[in-house]
Image: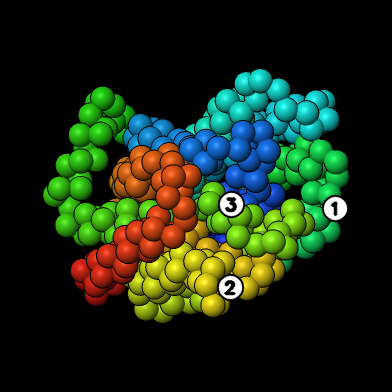
Amino acid sequence: METDQDDPQPAELRRNFFSLAAHYICLRTAWIFKTESVIMPAFLDIIAGQGWVRGCLPVLNRVAQSIPPLLLADSIRRKPLKRKFVFTTTFLMAIPFLILAIIWGVMDGKNFTGFAALFLFLYTIFFVFSGLQQSGIATLQGKLVPVTKRGRLMGVAGVIGSIMAVGCALAFMGKWLELPNGGYHLIFGFTGVGFLISSFAIAGANERPDIAEESSRPKTNVFKRAWSLFLKDHAFRKVAIVSMLLMSTQLLFPHYQALANVRFSDFDKRHLMIWVVCQNVGVGVVSVFSGWVADKFGNRLAIRFATVFTTLVPILALAMSAGPYKSSSISFSAVFVGIAWVPVSMRLFTNYILEISDSENHPFYVGSLKVCFAVPFILSPFVGVMVDLTGFDGVFIGIAALSLFGLIGTFRMVEPRQG
């Protein structure tokens, strides 16, 4: 693929930087109202309740985000303007949440037969569009933002996005959660509208069209190509293994709020808002630190920091919820600050992949990485069943051990900036 975006002017760089930052900020502000570790499992507990159903969330989330981007990687690569693709997919992300908002509002918080299945279906559709959006925005960022500015973009978007997201959560979420029906029609409505605004924010980017030839690669070979990439590209294989081990910690996301609900007598649904705020403040702080480390020393070191803290989070959750160090559900907010390292690490992995691949293959490399993200999630329902049968302790310690192996694996990853 050829492009004339290789020598942009300073004014063009600034415009694209701020356009991408505005897109990320609006996306973050909307996302706080559907946080995977708090809001979504709490809502599913209302309409379903079983641990294995809660355990379906991570696997549906990750598989839906991973397979479509890989299948459409060649199509994304050949699009002259990636900005249009990002606009469309972000716009479509709003639809499932607007539908949920209408249903919950019309039913006035009354559950009905089949609603859990409908919720999981819409949840899956949302993440199909979300995965495509993430692949598109990563490709667009690789095209428009120089490698030494991507960490700064992550930091700026993380800080401002956290401030806006936390401000909106403090202003609205607590009041809405106290409504008789839980206020989820307003929460989901806010999320949907936020995604709509985010889709229009990307329109300000100044992207020059790519000139691409039609691909001769058969679409049916996409998984074979991904497997071949894993086997033959040593740099990709090393980061893929680390990412799979680190992403296993996301299997615990739906269970943190359940752990607090079971073990803290002072648990109150208003604490959901506090945890969401703490997690998003954590994302802002971690984004700045990780972005600075990534720009100055490389994404490999930033990923290493992420694996250290991610390994400690499940142990911290157990220590704070039982035994001599048991605290309160308010103090348990520290766990959600630690969780912030996981979404930031996903951005770091993506930026790392952009460095070890050429621009023409960015969509395929990113799509293949997302499939690797999804591999641990095959075990997600099993983790939910194990929590129901054996409790939280053994499951949390096992996941922490996997993250520790991921930390060891970071010392085998190559540093692209050292050639």
Question: Up-down: is 327 above or below 52?
Answer: below
Question: What is the count of numbered marks?
Answer: 3
Residue, x 20% and y 48% (percent of image)? 230
Rendered-image quadrant of the C terminus: bottom left
User: Which circle, 1 or 2, is nearer the viewer?
Assistant: 2
Mark 3: few/some/many CA within 10 Å (<14, 14-19, 20+): some
Q: Earlier in the sequence, mark 2 or mark 3?
A: 3
Q: What residue type is labelled 2?
A: Lys
Q: CA separation, marks 2 and 3?
A: 16 Å
Q: Earlier in the sequence, mark 1 or mark 3?
A: 1
Mark 1: few/some/many CA within 10 Å (<14, 14-19, 20+): some
Q: Which residue sits furthest left?
A: 232
Circles 1 and 2: CB distance less than 8 Å? no
Left or right side of 58 for 373: left
Q: CA separation, marks 1 and 2?
A: 29 Å
Mark 2: few/some/many CA within 10 Å (<14, 14-19, 20+): some
* Disc 1 target residue: 175
Residue, x 80% and y 42% (percent of image)? 183
Question: Up-down: is 255 above or below 334?
Answer: above
Measuring from the top left, give residue 266's x and y in whole percent.
72, 63
Circles 2 and 3: CB distance less than 8 Å? no
Q: Nearer the viewer, residue 89 or 114?
A: 114
Q: Earlier in the sequence, mark 1 or mark 2?
A: 1
Q: Nearer the viewer, residue 418 or 236?
A: 236
**Rendered image quadrant of residue 63:** top left
Q: What residue type is labelled 3?
A: Ala
Q: What residue type is labelled 1?
A: Lys
* Disc 3 target residue: 258
Disc ID at residue 326: 2
